[in-house]
Amino acid sequence: MGTDTGLNFFHPGKNDQERELYVTAVACLTAGLNAHNDLVRSAVACAGNDFRLGAQEAPPAIMSLYPGPGFEAHVETIVKGGPLLGYEAKKSFADVKSRSAMPAETNAEDRNRTAPFPWCGNRFEFRAVGSSQNCAFPVAVCNTIMASGMAKLSKLIEGGTNHRDAVAALFLEAKHVIFTGKQPSSNY
């Protein structure tokens, strides 16, 4: 998902404009997922999928967003009044614990393979769709929830809220759908 000029909404970017776009896009996705969690869950519900992996792991009953613990900490900073800028997705090297192998480059954030919406370096993947399911409807739902979040942001900005505060408001209302492994919020 991106702009008509080629900017990827879900790539943290290399300059301030791209980084701000990334944070804003994640806020919109978070708001849309919060507002339409039941719709997203129903888009992937089927007997085969609901009992996948023993019905304990995938797909979860609550759809959550996994942007990584570093970004989750940045969200807390924004909600407390901090700037939209400040998060940098820096790749690092994993210690392979061997002198005969080179360190392996890792993603900027831990890549959670069981989350329904994990961030994977330049995109969010919707991993809750069943293997035998046609993905057209779930993709349409994902586009709809993103549009819903964008509409909410637009309404705030058109109402006089500045960009930073509008993004902070989206995160404040919906940050409980961000789940990076801590105890889930009781807001559901």
Image (cartoon, grey):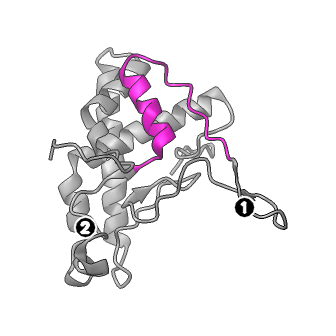
Q: Please name whichever residue, 19 or 107, is drawn nearer the observer in this view of the structure.
A: 107
Using the image, tell me which numbered label, if any, was put on residue 34. Answer: none
From the viewer's perspective, tell me whether residue 114 is left or right of residue 85.
left
Is 184 in front, or is 118? 184
| Amino acid type indicated by mark 2 | Ala
Which residue is situated farthest in the right direction here? 100
Q: Under tag 2, what secondary structure? A: helix
Q: Amino acid at mark 1?
A: Lys
Classify 88 as above or below 118: above
Horizontal and vertical percent position of residue 78: 42, 24
Q: Which residue is mark 2?
A: 43
Q: Could you give the CA–CA distance between mark 2 and mark 1, rounded to whole angstroms?
A: 43 Å
Give, as a single range, the part of the protein colored magenta. 66-91
Q: Quadrant of residue 103?
A: bottom right
The x and y percentages for residue 6 are: 63, 46
Residue depicted at 29% across the width and 45% down the height:
177
In the rendered image, the vertical position of residue 44 relative to residue 161, given as above or below: below
User: SS of the residue at dot 1?
Assistant: loop
**Is-magenta flag for residue 86?**
yes
In the picture, residue 153 is in which quadrant?
A: top left
Judged by depth in the image, the label closer to the viewer, 2 or 1, is 1
Q: Pointer 2: residues within 10 angstroms few (<14), some, or many (20+)?
A: many
Q: Position of residue 88 (x, y in %)?
A: 61, 35
Label 1 crowd (10 A; few <14 / some 14-19 / many >=20):
few
From the viewer's side, name the closer residue of 17 and 169: 169
Image quadrant of residue 4? Answer: top right
Mark 2 / mark 1, whichever is N-terminal: 2
Residue 135 in view, yes or no = yes
Residue located 32% across and 14% down the image:
160
Judging by the rendered image, the residue that carries numbered circle 1 is 97
Residue for point 16% across, 41% down: 187
